[in-house]
Image: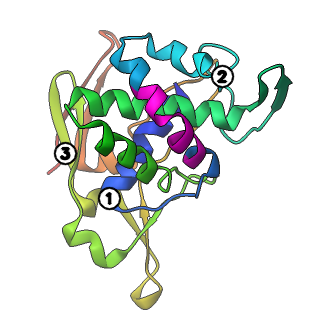
């Protein structure tokens, strides 16, 4: 679940122009395994089995292993590690989404390579250029079949004043282990834009634009 969340935050970072950490592992997966991943998806292979089949994961799924932990495993096929496994799983998700949008294979491979520069920092924060706020897109969440949009002014946090102002993306990927996780948190940036009502008795929640 955390890898899925990390993949989504990376895509958001790319859209809003919030550069992340440079991932050499991601670049290697994109260049060496990208076409193979596409071929397997086009042949309708189960996405969870693709990374093990190309030798980058030793199991089906990362089973909640933290992205920042690198454990090297030596076996007969060569060296594999958790970082390569994680980025492979993200590449599969990105490629699958792009194929669903009928993108060409060349564009998909270029897109995956581009996303390698937008993977969120382990510290969680992603900075953006404050001067770009006016040209940044809205980001919408689909909940219960309805879309709830946030404007750049709502999802970008401004810290400091004047020339020292720093703009931080409000979207963060957090690895929360069981029993509390994995979970999605609609935090302050969302609840500041939408009035939220909780019905604990019926296990429901309602949203309306804040006044």
Against 164, residue 207 (above or below) is: above
Residue 101, label in figure: none
Left or right: where does residue 15 sit relative to residue 89?
A: left
Seen at 46% across and 38% down, the residue is 7
Seen at 52% across and 18% down, the residue is 50
- Residue, disc 3: 149
Disc 2, SS: loop
Nearer to the camera, 195 or 183 = 183
Q: Is residue 62 magenta?
A: no
Is tag 3's residue or tag 1's residue first in the polypeptide sequence? 1
Disc 1, SS: helix
Query: Depth-wise, is mark 3 or mark 1 nearer the camera?
Result: 1
- Residue, disc 1: 16
Q: Position of residue 4 (x, y in %)?
A: 47, 30
Q: Position of residue 182 (x, y in %)?
A: 54, 24
Seen at 28% across and 73% down, the residue is 132
**Residue span colored magenta:** 27-38
Is tag 1's residue or tag 2's residue first in the polypeptide sequence? 1
- Asked where in the image residue 167 lies, by quadrant, the reply is bottom left
Q: Main secondary structure of the magenta part?
A: helix
Left or right: where does residue 117 sit relative to residue 210?
A: right
Nearer to the camera, 85 or 183 = 85
Residue 55, label in figure: 2
Is tag 3's residue or tag 2's residue first in the polypeptide sequence? 2
Nearer to the camera, 139 or 61 = 61
Q: Position of residue 109 (x, y in %)?
A: 39, 42
Seen at 63% across and 52% down, the residue is 24
């Amino acid at each position: 679940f955390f890898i899925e969340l990390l993949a989504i935050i990376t895509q958001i970072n790319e859209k809003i122009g919030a550069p992340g950490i440079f991932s050499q592992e991601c670049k290697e997966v994109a260049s060496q395994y990208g076409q193979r991943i596409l071929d397997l998806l086009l042949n309708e292979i189960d996405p969870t089995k693709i990374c093990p089949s190309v030798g980058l994961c030793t199991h089906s799924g990362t089973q909640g292993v933290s992205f920042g932990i690198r454990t090297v495993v030596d076996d007969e096929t060569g060296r594999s590690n958790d970082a390569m496994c994680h980025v492979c799983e993200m590449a599969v998700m990105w490629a699958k989404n792009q194929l669903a949008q009928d993108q060409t294979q060349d564009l998909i491979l270029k897109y995956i390579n581009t996303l390698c520069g937008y993977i969120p920092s382990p510290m969680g924060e992603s900075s953006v250029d404050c001067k770009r706020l006016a040209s940044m897109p809205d980001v919408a969440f689909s909940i219960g079949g309805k879309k709830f949009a946030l404007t750049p002014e709502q999802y970008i946090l401004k810290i400091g004043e004047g020339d020292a102002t720093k703009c931080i993306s409000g979207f963060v990927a957090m690895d929360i282990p069981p029993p509390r996780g994995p979970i999605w948190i609609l935090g302050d940036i969302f609840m500041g834009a939408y009035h939220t009502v909780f019905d604990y008795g019926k296990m429901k929640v309602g949203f309306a634009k804040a006044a």
